[in-house]
Amino acid sequence: MLTVDAWVNGRTKVVQAQSLLCAKLQERDKLIKERVEYLAKKRGITFDEMWEQILNNTAQKTIPVKVKG
């Protein structure tokens, strides 16, 4: 599919893949930021702190708490 899409658009597969990824991320921009905001609030830190932790690969995954019942 990527090969055909690239050919139709007169681009290499790499350039077309980059373009598609960029477009998809732009579509998800608001959702991604909302999720980061949620994670930050859950940890009691600011959005910017959470964003930096993710970028610096220092953010810790949360461990779900199992409820006995």
Image (cartoon, rainbow, N blue to C red):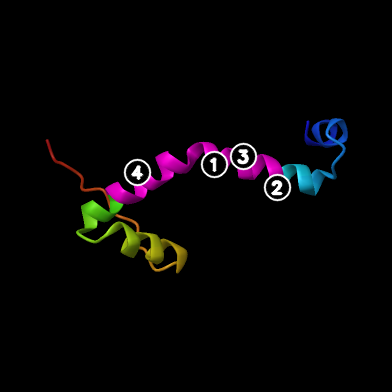
Measured Cα–Cα span from mark 3 to mark 2: 9 Å
Question: Residue at 78% across / 30% down in the picture?
Answer: 1
Question: Residue at 82% across / 37% down in the picture?
Answer: 6
Mark 3 surroundings: few (<14), some (14-19) or many (≥20) residues within 10 A? few
Query: What is the secondary structure assignment of the residue under circle 4?
Result: helix
Badge 2 is on which residue?
18
The three-letter amino acid code for the residue at tag 4 is Glu
The three-letter amino acid code for the residue at tag 1 is Gln
Measured Cα–Cα span from mark 4 to mark 1: 14 Å
Query: What is the secondary structure assignment of the residue under circle 2?
Result: helix
Badge 3 is on which residue?
23
Magenta span includes 36: yes
Q: Image quadrant of residue 54?
A: bottom left
The three-letter amino acid code for the residue at tag 3 is Ala
- CB under 8 Å between callouts 1 and 3? yes
Rendered location of residue 35, percent (x, y): 35, 45
Measured Cα–Cα span from mark 1 to mark 3: 5 Å
Question: Residue at 26% across / 60% down in the picture?
Answer: 46
- CB under 8 Å between callouts 3 and 2? no
Rendered location of residue 31, percent (x, y): 41, 39
Query: What is the secondary structure assignment of the residue under circle 3?
Result: helix
Q: Earlier in the sequence, mark 1 or mark 2?
A: 2
- CB under 8 Å between callouts 1 and 2? no
Badge 4 is on which residue?
34
Mark 2 surroundings: few (<14), some (14-19) or many (≥20) residues within 10 A? few
Q: Main secondary structure of the magenta part?
A: helix
Determine which of the numbered discs, if any, sits on residue 26 in the image: 1
Q: Nearer the viewer, mark 1 or mark 2?
A: 1
Q: Which residues are magenta?
A: 18-38
